[in-house]
Amino acid sequence: AVGAAMGQLTASNRNDSWLTGLIDMEYWLACNEERAAQTRFGAVMCCCGPCAMYRRSALLLLLDQYETQFFRGKPSDFGEDRHLTILMLKAGFRTEYVPDAIAATVVPDKLLPYLRQQLRWARSTYRDTLLGLHLLPGLDRYLTLDVLGQNLGPLLLAISSIAALAQLALTDSVPWWTGLTIVVMTMVRCSVAALRAGELRFLGFALHTPINIFLLLPMKAYALCTLSN
């Protein structure tokens, strides 16, 4: 019944810079929170490229669709791992996360290449979420909640941040409640991760929040507006 499986990703160069260390923690969270939860309900939504395995007989059934990926009439040649995962689910196969299978991959060590990578991934996520929406009614309800949360969560965070900046600009009053809420949620998430991973370094993942708000959210908005690029 399983058409595809993915393993746990680590950054082989995680000690090279503050960014590679941050990305290594990001991968751990993506694998051991997001994918681990999804596999409990029968469908990992993206079997990540650096550590994925596919049932050969299933792949042969989907090969023509996989090799001729189009979006709005144009060839699409990135985000192939997410696209193939969606095709597996569409064909009725399960997709799973296997934490005991571990692969090390080299990650961007500078901010600009990292943002370029995230732009590609954001476009891929939006495209294949649109292509896979019709699958959700046939999957566990948790997966519908998960997909909605991943796509609406950043939007709500962006609206909150814009509203806070507008309040600061128009009224000269500090939007302390918004800031406090973001700080508290960040520290709760990082503390839980540090506890589960057994590593205090995950408290440093709090640095990802300002990067997310001031860099990744605008980049995701740009990705959404340029899906046909």
Image (spheres, grey):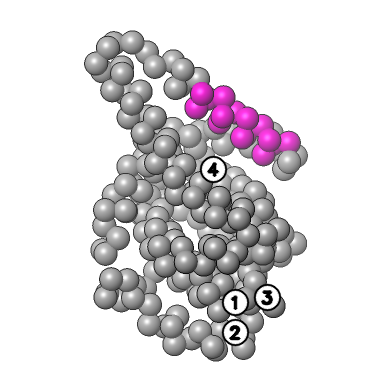
Q: Which residue is mark 4?
A: 22
Q: Can you say whether 3 is above or below 144 in the image?
A: below
The mark that comes first in sequence, 2 or 4, is 4
**For the residue labelled by badge 4, is the local secondary structure a helix, a strand or a loop?**
helix
| Extent of the magenta region | 181-195
The mark that comes first in sequence, 1 or 4, is 4
Query: How far apart are the alpha carbons under marks 1 and 4?
Result: 36 Å
Q: Quadrant of residue 4?
A: bottom right
The x and y percentages for residue 104 are 62, 60
Q: Quadrant of residue 122?
A: bottom left
Please identify the quadrant where the C terminus is shown.
Answer: bottom left
Callout 3 crowding tier (Cα within 10 Å): few <14, some 14–19, many ≥20? some
User: What residue lies at 54% left-to-right and 42% top-to-bottom?
Assistant: 22
The mark that comes first in sequence, 3 or 2, is 3
Q: Nearer the viewer, mark 1 or mark 3?
A: 1
**For the residue labelled by badge 2, is the local secondary structure a helix, a strand or a loop?**
helix
The mark that comes first in sequence, 1 or 3, is 3
- Identity, as a three-letter code, of the amino acid under mark 4: Leu
Q: Nearer the viewer, mark 1 or mark 2?
A: 1
Query: How far apart are the alpha carbons under marks 4 and 3?
Result: 32 Å
Q: Which residue is mark 2?
A: 58
Q: Which mark is residue 2?
A: 3
Badges 1 and 4: C-beta atoms under 8 Å apart? no
The x and y percentages for residue 223 are 32, 53
Callout 4 crowding tier (Cα within 10 Å): few <14, some 14–19, many ≥20? many
Callout 2 crowding tier (Cα within 10 Å): few <14, some 14–19, many ≥20? some
**For the residue labelled by badge 3, is the local secondary structure a helix, a strand or a loop?**
strand
Query: How far apart are the alpha carbons under marks 2 and 4?
Result: 35 Å
The x and y percentages for residue 124 are 40, 62
User: What residue lies at 28% left-to-right and 71% top-to-bottom?
Assistant: 72
Callout 1 crowding tier (Cα within 10 Å): few <14, some 14–19, many ≥20? some
